Image (cartoon, rainbow, N blue to C red):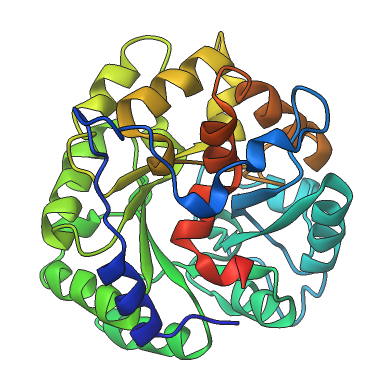
Amino acid sequence: MRMNARMWRTFTTNRTWTARRGTADHDAVDQRWQGLGTGRLGRSGLTLLLDSHLHVVSPDGARHPLAPVGLPGDSWATTRPASVDVLAADLVSAGVGGGVLVQAVGAYGYDNSYVVEAAERFDQFVAQVVVDHTSSDRVADLHRWATRGAGGVRLFDIPAADPRWLGVPGFEEVVEVCLDLGLRIACCVLPDGLDDVARVLDLVAGRAPVVLDHCGFVDLDTGGLVTLARLADRGDLVCKVTSHVLAGLVDPAATVARLVAAFGADHVCWGSDHPQHEGSYADKVALVSRAADDLTDDQRAMFLAGTTANLWPELVR
């Protein structure tokens, strides 16, 4: 089932995107996910997981030719590609119920054809697209991909993107169009772009969540958590903890617990970043399961599935 704009507006109207800091229910989670943490596959496993960050690469290079934009690490698209068919099988094997297919800018640039096609073929996936923020057609492109069933848009602001998203005249219109179309917004920025994320939050003004991909690439072991916590009072920011983040931590479980304490369990989610991040899908699931070991059962369920389900309810319908 694909969520249309009316469904999303109704959903966000009925959902309170606040972290509830300073109140007794700061760590409260959606009642639908209460108790899910008790169905363990051992101490470091759950019976339900949802993956908020996956990439796909088509095996048909003629129909979907690679078009990298010169980002660091672009080679993964040729050295360890994964078609949607392979990815679907990986999720089944790992016990993951579904996930978000994030447009791989490093593989296809702004051509979202394959990621949208892949999500159309498999109900357990939803597509998140990227549009060229320098194009005069960017608003029309948002409409086009939304019509094709895309569920979200990624504001991609890594250094190769120049000028930056927020330096483009009319950016406010892009945010309004995303909200009107029901396209959930994610920001992919480096640490020096966190002020820009704050401006996105100001523009959204609590009407919908804003996801921060890879926790903004901050170093969570050396003060990055303090930097992120400054945004925690903006209750509509959701931190996405990916394999890239977890692999670089000294103590992943302790750091995830601190993130949950700062943002609330319903504002932190997991994404594998598979196959861009090296390693098997099973290894990434094992990594995040261990990283959730310091959470309560309900926090764990929210981190591994509930937050993603709240962001993308079509994954569980």
Q: What residue do we see at 69% from left, 73% from top?
A: 65
Evaluate whether residue 222 shows in this view: yes
213 or 232: which is nearer to us?
A: 232
Q: Is residue 4 left or right of residue 172?
A: right
157 or 35: which is nearer to us?
A: 35
230 or 104: which is nearer to us?
A: 230
Residue 121 placement (x, y as % from top left) = 74, 81
Q: Is residue 169 left or right of residue 64?
A: left
Which image quarter is the N terminus in?
bottom right
* 233, above or below 4, in the image: above
Residue 165 placement (x, y as % from top left) = 23, 58
Q: What residue do we see at 47% from left, 73% from top?
A: 151
Residue 94 placement (x, y as % from top left) = 83, 45
Which image quarter is the C terminus in?
bottom right
Q: What residue do we see at 69% from left, 61% from top?
A: 56
Evaluate whether residue 239 shows in this view: no
Q: Is residue 7 left or right of residue 269?
A: left
Count all numbered tags in the image, as a single digit.
Answer: 0
Q: What residue do we see at 34% from left, 36% from top?
A: 190
* 221, above or below 208, in the image: above
Picture quadrant of residue 219: top left
* 237, above or below 126, in the image: above
